[in-house]
Amino acid sequence: MLRSAIVLICLMLIFAPTAHAQEAESPVILLDIFHVGEADTAVRDAIITVLDEAGFLVLPAGTIGVDAPALTITITTARTIRLTDAHYTPPSPLIQSVPDQPIAFESAATVLNLAYYATDNCAEAFEEPDNTLAFFMANCALRTGDYTSAIDLYEGIPGGDLTVAVNLAWAYLQTGATEQAFAVMDSAVVSASTEVQNAYKAAALAMTLADAGAIHALAFDFDTAINYLTQAIDISETYALPQPFIADLYTQRGDHIFLIYEWDRVLADYDRAIELDSTAANAYFARGVLYYTQGPRPLALEDFLRFIELAPDDARHPEAEGYIESIQAELDALGGDDVEAFPPGG
């Protein structure tokens, strides 16, 4: 009761007069509404009302101790929405759950569909399709394995949004249309390569090259994938982009080289990533896997421990723990932690 009272007071202060407290089990949405120019309170109230009536517990963005999807809405003459967070579970780590570009706001129902999507409820989302939400509808089609519908929806989205290109290419791969997938990403690279004259455009090109590399790697075209990552690294170093950004590119290239078994090159890339960014958790995990498979395993142990320290909430945490337990058991059986006990390749 006390919790409900506190929530009610907060909502009355921030979103009055339309919102009221919901049942504790209601899905939670963190809502942040901005206005440009004269505040359109009618639109704000309509948004809150439609979420409230659908059973969502609407809380202000930044509510302490609440981990929930966040909807950020900017009410302007252009009437746009940006979904900044989503608990949506994509079918692949490569799939982007939120587009780069804002969404046109047609009605409060637009927000309701986004709320269903953000809370991983594709079954209820888009029962009355909103033409501005094709990206999200396509992602839901991917989840159900309806790749043909997903492709049709992605192809109908105008503009050069990289997230659309990546998701479309991935959908093509699922249907066996490898050449079409390559063509989508190769075209995105050509588009991003136009007039690269500053760090911002260089970063956009590097990210496009990295994503194109990932698509090619998924289709076992590792040479092209490695080439794309090399180009991404070169452009990033030329424009002196942030070192953590470049470190991630080295890690990705190392991951691709790993799959063609060139261990010295793999290690060199992971080492370089960590040299550039001592907090590069992905590089520590990847190098740990390399050391575990090729030796020496005590160095793998160090990397997995460092990974857990840097990324305690990472989804690979249990996997890292498994490696650690395995290595420690072997070390205990050998009665020491000498690197010589696990020579390279052992």
Image (spheres, grey):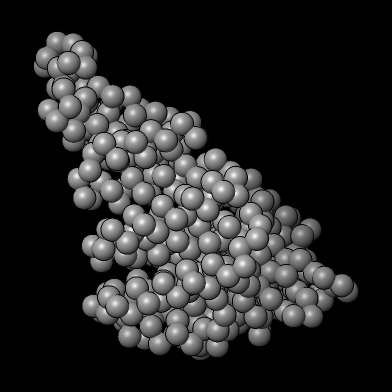
Relative height, residue 53 to residue 22 (above, below):
below
4 and 134: which is toward the camera: 134
Locate residue 172, reporting x and y percent. Answer: 32, 77
Q: Position of residue 13 (x, y in %)?
A: 79, 58
Residue at 11 percent of width and 14 percent of height: 334
Residue 172, visible in the rendered structure: no
Q: Residue at x 26, y 36 (%)?
A: 264
> How far across and how far down the image is residue 325, in percent?
22, 28
* Residue farthest toward the top in the current orientation of the protein: 335
Q: Viewed as shown, does residue 98 lie left or right of 216? A: right
- Whether residue 257 is situated above or below residue 32 in the rendered picture: above
Which quadrant of the figure has residue 92? bottom left
Count of residue discs: 0
Q: Quadrant of the C terminus?
A: top left
In the image, 149: left or right of 200? left
Which image quarter: residue 213?
bottom left
Q: Which residue is at the front of the view, 196 or 177?
A: 196
**As drawn, which residue projects farthest toward the right?**
38
State the residue at coordinates (78%, 76%): 76
Q: Residue at x 72, y 79 (%)?
A: 79
Nearer the observer, 207 or 186: 186
**Image position, residue 192 (x, y; %):** 54, 68
Taking depth in this image into account, of 231 and 158 the one nearest to the observer is: 231
Can residue 300 be spotted in the picture? yes
